[in-house]
Image (tube, helix red, strand yellow):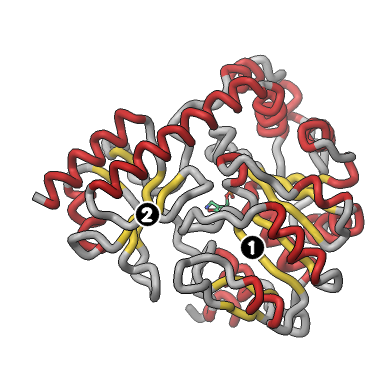
Amino acid sequence: MEFYSRRARDITPYKAGEQPKGCNFVKLNTNENPYPPSPRVAEAVSAFPCGRLRLYPSPEADDLRDAIARYEGVARENVFVSNGSDEALALAFAAFFDDERAACFADVTYSFYEVFAAMFGAKTQVVPLKEDFTLDIAAMRACPCAGYFIANPNAPTGIAVSAGEMEKFIASAPDRLFVLDEAYAEFSGETCVPLIKKYPNLAVIKTFSKSHSLAGIRCGYAVGAPALIEGLLRMKNSFNSYPVDAVCAAACAAALADGEYHEKTVRLVTKERERLRGELEKLGFFVPPSGANFLFAGRARLPAGEIYRRLKEEGVLVRHWDRPRISDFCRITVGTPHDDDILLEKLKKIFA
Ligand code: PMP
């Protein structure tokens, strides 16, 4: 297009999973939580004084920042709140990487990283996962770079690196920045957040979209040493002063306040994940152990692309990428037991 900048012309945008209108699908394609958010969220939203919308929100979402700080056991200065965790990840590329400071990440990981790098002109180093899809920490350590983006658990594989192993990696490279994308960590039972007190080279990024069932509200956050948070604020305040609206901040604080509900729904999802994994294996899929709210299922009796298409015809949406190394897998979000039974029934029909 004649009016486009070179950047807009050249970039290949990230492609999000399908969000069909009038959803009659069993939707297992974008890792949304199958359960609604805590009832306290509905209460907070309906009690929100709409007259207050006349005013701009707190630029740094300070009340929510404090609520997150309490939840994570850190101080306000350790927290940065963003419009979805995607925004925190994007601003981390902008704040910490450029054409001389290369960002290193795996070949099979969250595909937004390469788009953010292109958007902000960051040099990249891509290190293949090992044959079994685990992180090749030795190869990453040997790679010349200014830092790492690591989704833990990884997407789309669901495979997690233990906090102990991650700490060894972080401690081994104090001159490099670690951006850990813990979008799915609540489903693994482990987080590296406590390590931020020990390692000034660590930022952990989390989201309200998955375990808190708030993908529709768009809120995420980063936790790290104050100097890293300052870096993110510098970028935010050069781009959008008020990325988190007042209703969103109230809703997310309400979700954090209901720890019991959060634990209960996380437990339901992880229990169902293990059942679904067993059932998929019985159908002949290879499914690596997952620490997330999805399973990476492949090497079945039919090509994964065909399984994806036939499931869609049958009203079940899963995710498939026609990309090297992963084209033989479908990523399947853990649904309710009822939705997953529909998936399993359709798979049996397709394989028959
Ligand atoms: N990280 C990973 C690994 C993800 O899969 C996603 C969801 N697409 C995100 C971050 C972003 O989630 P959100 O912007 O909804 O917080």
Q: Is residue 105 above or below residue 352?
A: below
Q: Which residue is mark 2?
A: 287
Sequence-wise first label, 1 or 2: 1
- Residue 215: image location, x then y, percent: 54, 40
Could you tell me the amino acid type at mark 1? Ile
Q: Is residue 54 above or below residue 122?
A: above
- Residue 5: image location, x then y, percent: 60, 78
Q: Is residue 70 above or below residue 207?
A: above
The structure residue drawn at horizontal position 33% and vertical position 57%, both measured from the top left corner, is 286
Task: Tell which tag, 1 or 2, sits nearer the viewer.
Answer: 2
- CA–CA distance in space, label 1 to label 2: 21 Å
The structure residue drawn at horizontal position 67% and vertical position 15%, both measured from the top left corner, is 47
- In the picture, the disc for residue 150 is 1
User: Is there any visible trace of residue 80 in the rendered image?
Assistant: yes
Could you tell me the amino acid type at mark 2? Val
Disc 2 on helix, strand or loop? loop
Task: Answer left or right for 285 relative to 346.
Answer: right
- Residue 116: image location, x then y, percent: 62, 68
Taking depth in this image into account, of 40 and 12 the one nearest to the observer is: 40
The local crowd at label 1, few if under 14, some if 14 to 19, many if 20 or more residues have their Cα within 10 Å, is: many
The structure residue drawn at horizontal position 48% and vertical position 66%, both measured from the top left corner, is 133
Q: Is residue 332 above or below residue 61?
A: below
Q: Are marks 1 and 2 in contact (CB under 8 Å)?
A: no
The structure residue drawn at horizontal position 65% and vertical position 26%, both measured from the top left corner, is 255
Residue 245 image-quadrant placement:
top right
- Residue 170: image location, x then y, percent: 77, 64
Task: Answer left or right for 71 relative to 43.
Answer: right
User: Is there any visible trace of residue 5 in the rendered image?
Assistant: no
Taking depth in this image into account, of 32 and 300 the one nearest to the observer is: 300
Task: Answer left or right for 345 relative to 169.
Answer: left
